[in-house]
Image: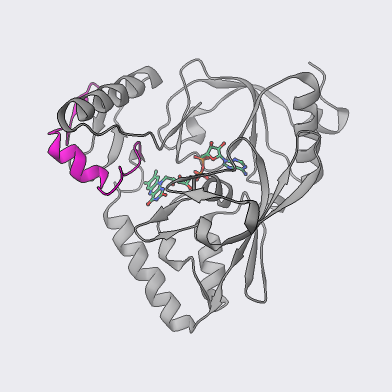
Amino acid sequence: MEFSQSVQHLIRENEPLAPLTWLQVGGASRFYAEPCSLEELRCLVADAQRLGIPFRLLGDGSNILVRDAGCDGLVINLSSAELSSITVTENKLICGSGARLSHAISHAVGAGLAGIEYLAGIPGTIGGAVVGNAGVKNCDFGSRVTRVRIIDSEGLTSDLERSSLQFGFRHGNLDGTVVVEVEIGLEPTAREELTRRMQAAWIVQRAAQPPSGTRGVQAFVDPDGASIAEVLEEAALKGYTEGPVALSSEFPGFLVVNGVASSDQVLALIGKVTQSVHARTGIQLQPQLRIW
Ligand SMILES: Cc1cc2nc3c(=O)[nH]c(=O)nc-3n(C[C@H](O)[C@H](O)[C@H](O)COP(=O)(O)OP(=O)(O)OC[C@H]3O[C@@H](n4cnc5c(N)ncnc54)[C@H](O)[C@@H]3O)c2cc1C
């Protein structure tokens, strides 16, 4: 497998992916790279296309379950400084897709710009947030996005303007693209007020999440008109446990892993919960977690 000389030094083989995800389960990636620049990223994408290697983009791994067999392709991690920059221009924030959502929020609040402070406490990167349209009740990331820069299969960049972007509840039309930059449109507002909103959102969000260090994720999307917590309660599945995998009883909606677990065990629990909820309530749960 011959990657271009300019990126060969970046390629690692059989890289374990579990430590790079919140659930910390699953296998390795056949190829793995952390490009340091846009040029290297372009080259990796073009190489993968030329060599017929499937590739995936990794953000913070807070919404990914890697299968035990791992990924037979190239995983590209965009966490380098150049791909994670954040700049403020007038009423806009321009973020590299590897930037953390929390850093983008702090920059916006510091610049007195309102619109994303309500998302404080959601883990992950700008890339993950725009692809999955991360959000909280009544506020989603997509509604603030004014432009997205992507790289096509030949490694060329192009801009998707607002009119060609679609965002729904925890999804959008950017799946399968390579997002490198996101422009966020915001409104000038007093910094003190924004700090207050950001802190309030963070406290509410963190109080609903398992404590730091817990291997917990949101496995399902809230079904139409209901919260996943209510649905699990109604189906008497709160706290449902199989071996090392459980639905948290303390933090409704979170799937948690304790000790040694396989990806198959996580998938088995997700499958059983989906079936039981359907049988008991008629609701068809949709996964939030991306299965790799
Ligand atoms: C404790 C906890 C609390 C959470 N709370 C919320 C919440 O309140 N609201 C909410 O919406 N979500 C929530 N989530 C889910 C998760 O935080 C979001 O989905 C987040 O936006 C994922 O970002 P990430 O960088 O971790 O993406 P990853 O998990 O790394 O990736 C998710 C998907 O995005 C793709 N992707 C990532 N970067 C790029 C890129 N640059 N270009 C193209 N594709 C890309 C990946 O390929 C993958 O398909 C929570 C998760 C946890 C663990």
Q: Residue at x 27, y 42 (%)?
A: 253
Residue 65 percent coordinates (x, y): 44, 29
Q: How many labels were placed on the picture?
A: 0
Picture quadrant of residue 252: top left
Picture quadrant of residue 239: top left
Q: In this view, does 188 lie to the left or right of 180?
A: left
Q: In this view, does 87 lie to the left or right of 58?
A: right
Residue 168 in the image: above or below residue 276: below
Picture quadrant of residue 54: top right
Residue 172 in the image: above or below residue 108: above
Asked whether residue 237 is drawn in magenta, I would say yes
Residue 284 in the image: above or below residue 142: above
Dominant SS of magenta comes to loop
Q: In this view, does 100 lie to the left or right of 32?
A: left
Residue 40 percent coordinates (x, y): 79, 39
Q: Residue at x 15, y 40 (%)?
A: 233
Residue 278 percent coordinates (x, y): 23, 28
Asked whether residue 179 is drawn in magenta, I would say no
Q: Residue at x 73, y 40 (%)?
A: 35
Residue 205 in the image: above or below residue 236: below
Residues in magenta, as a range: 218-243
